[in-house]
Image: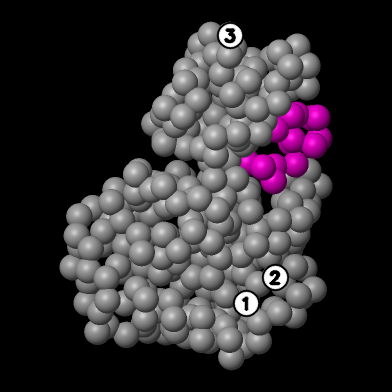
Amino acid sequence: MRRTTSLVAAAAVTVLALSGCGLSGDALESGGGGSCDSSEKPKDGPIKIGSADFPESSLIAEVYAGALKAKGINASTTDPIGAREAYLKALSDGSVQIVPEYTNSLLTFLDKDAQAKGPDEIYAALLTTVPCDQLALQKSAAEDSNAIVVPKNVADKWQLKTISDLAKHANEVTIAAPAEFRTREQGLVGLKSTYQLTPKSFRPLGNPQAIASALKNGQAQAANIFSTDPAITTNGFVVLKDDKQLFGSDNVVPLIAKKAATPKVQVTLNAVSTKLTTPVLAQMLKQVVVDKKDAKSVAATFLKQNGLA
């Protein structure tokens, strides 16, 4: 495990690597943050942590908030904000100072032409793509990628193992997914360009539980569900292999406004990332979604068990 000194060094390297960027354009579309004042120093102050509108994002936000509060930092979570477009806007306009993110999903959102493959290459590309008034801190080992899943009976009937296999049945498939999946590169756009998969129909649904229910009840033959979602094992869904690597490696990473990125905040969040693994995240998410435990309580237990609170 990295010690505090190495975490400080890592934070410093990240700051040095990004403090000079002066990209232009729309921060939410191209990764550019317009004109940034690189001389402005981060300041102590209240920190609000936003999240997307799904349980895992809210859970990670509680982990970040709890870790910061344990170090005497005034931190709190907001209500879930919504899709990436909405919470990145909140980060940009100062409504929140931190959001949990996913490396490849954020990279391809900011740069639709990104070609990076593999966790380290994707993370390196992300560091140079985020808006210049923001920082991507240390990525965790916890990975939660977009996945295309099908019920076991559909997988057996069509002999499905890969997304390429599913593409052969495109004219029979209804895909259930969040509404934004329709226009995302890591969505219907990418399924068409990468797999030549254009489904018979698309069923936009508002939350993971509704998506899993549609799949279970036969209202859809395939769905976009995150790979750590306990609904996969609970319902015996089959995760199709992303054989052409459309979705890539999605490691959990804190995204923070530079104005709030004091060394203490960076070291604290980087320490969380060193402890957060895929099995740990999946187990915590099960406690929240299946066992109906309070996310803040689950986060607090994780922090105590790992010496972070």
**Count of number-bearing discs:** 3
Q: Which residue appears at 71% of the width and 79% of the height?
A: 1
- Tag 1 residue: 271
Q: Earlier in the sequence, mark 3 or mark 1?
A: 3
Report whether residue 265 is seen: no
Disc 3 on helix, strand or loop?
helix
Residue 263 visible to an observer of this rendering? yes
For this rendering, which residue is in front, 127 or 98?
127
- Is residue 234 found inside the magenta-colored segment of the image? yes
Task: Identify which residue is drawn at 70% across, 21% down.
Answer: 160
Question: Where does label 3 land, which residue?
Answer: 172
Q: In this rendered view, identify the residue nearer to me: 267 or 239.
A: 239
Q: Are marks 1 and 2 in contact (CB under 8 Å)?
A: yes
Q: Which residues are magenta?
A: 226-239
Q: Which residue is mark 2?
A: 275
Image coords of residue 126 (percent x, y): 42, 60
Looking at this rendering, what residue extends furthest in the top direction? 171
Q: At label 2, which amino acid type do we have?
A: Lys
Separation of residues labelled 3 and 2 (CA atoms): 43 Å
Q: Is residue 55 above or below residue 191?
A: below
The amino acid type, in three-letter code, at marker 1 is Ala
